[in-house]
């Protein structure tokens, strides 16, 4: 059985949804950020990065959302969460997921975690003030060039859609109007209505 360590309101939602979507045999363990459990000795032995998600597998522990999503897709091929039969499309999926992880998520994190990059309070505030622009620019690029429609990869649903939905949930908190991006807004609406997505979002909210 797999074990997912997650915290509500974080990018771990993507892995949580993917596991449920795949019909995986898994348990979800909440890491309580309000009690700094991610910095506890017990959790740091599991994931020295002190972040979520972390997925415990029979071969070891995986971290980083793109890696976890691909692992879930490849170990549960019947769920068809990745274009495993198309090398180029799989690479496109991973390129998109890497962009979400390395660029979009980082731009978002500047709103409340500027201390990771600067000690000067003025610099931290400047990063925070820049978030609506930087996050907005990221989603403008996704809207224009990467959301091929109706799904990220066009006609084929994948873990990229789950990941995009997860980060798009944060737009209002970043002072970005999702309605600036009609394709992203429609994608988020359709994803939110999916029974699996609704079930996991509700489950995480009730655990928060």
Image (tube, rainbow, N blue to C red):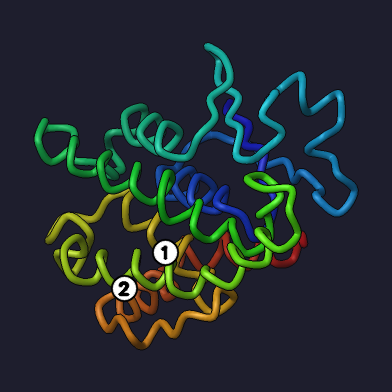
Q: Residue at x 53, y 25 (%)?
A: 62
Q: Is residue 170 left or right of residue 121?
A: left
- What kind of element bears circle 2? helix
Q: Determine which quarter of the picture holds residue 204.
A: bottom right
Q: Distance of mark 2 from mark 1, alpha carbons?
A: 8 Å
Is residue 154 placed above or below 79 in the rendered structure?
below
Percent x, y of residue 135: 43, 67
Q: Residues within 10 Å of mark 1 (few under 14, many from 20)?
A: many
Q: Quadrant of the N terminus?
A: top right
Query: Could you say which is closer to the camera, residue 4 or residue 100?
Result: 100
Percent x, y of residue 13: 55, 53
Checking the image for residue 44, the label placed there is none
Checking the image for residue 187, the label placed there is 2
Q: Determine which quarter of the picture holds residue 199.
A: bottom right
Q: Earlier in the sequence, mark 2 or mark 1?
A: 1
Q: Residues within 10 Å of mark 2 (few under 14, many from 20)?
A: many
Q: Determine which quarter of the picture holds residue 201.
A: bottom right
Q: Which residue is mark 1?
A: 165
């Amino acid at each position: 059985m797999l074990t997912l360590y997650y915290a509500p309101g974080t990018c771990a939602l993507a892995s949580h949804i993917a596991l449920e979507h795949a019909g995986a045999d898994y348990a979800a363990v909440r890491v309580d950020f309000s009690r700094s459990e991610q910095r506890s000795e017990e959790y740091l032995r599991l994931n020295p990065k002190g972040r979520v998600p972390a997925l415990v597998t029979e071969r070891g522990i995986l971290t980083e959302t793109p890696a976890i999503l691909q692992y879930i897709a490849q170990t549960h091929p019947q769920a068809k969460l990745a274009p495993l039969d198309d090398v180029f499309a799989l690479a496109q999926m991973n390129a998109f997921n890497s962009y979400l992880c390395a660029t979009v998520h980082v731009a978002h994190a500047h709103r409340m975690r500027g201390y990771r990059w600067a000690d000067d309070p003025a610099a931290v505030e400047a990063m925070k003030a820049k978030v609506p622009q930087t996050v907005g620019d990221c989603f403008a690029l996704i809207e224009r060039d990467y959301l091929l429609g109706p799904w990220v990869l066009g006609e084929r649903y994948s873990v990229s859609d789950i990941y995009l939905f997860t980060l798009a949930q944060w737009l209002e908190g970043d002072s970005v109007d999702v309605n600036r991006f009609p394709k992203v807004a429609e994608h988020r609406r359709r994803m939110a209505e999916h029974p699996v997505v609704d079930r996991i979002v509700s489950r995480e909210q009730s655990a928060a």
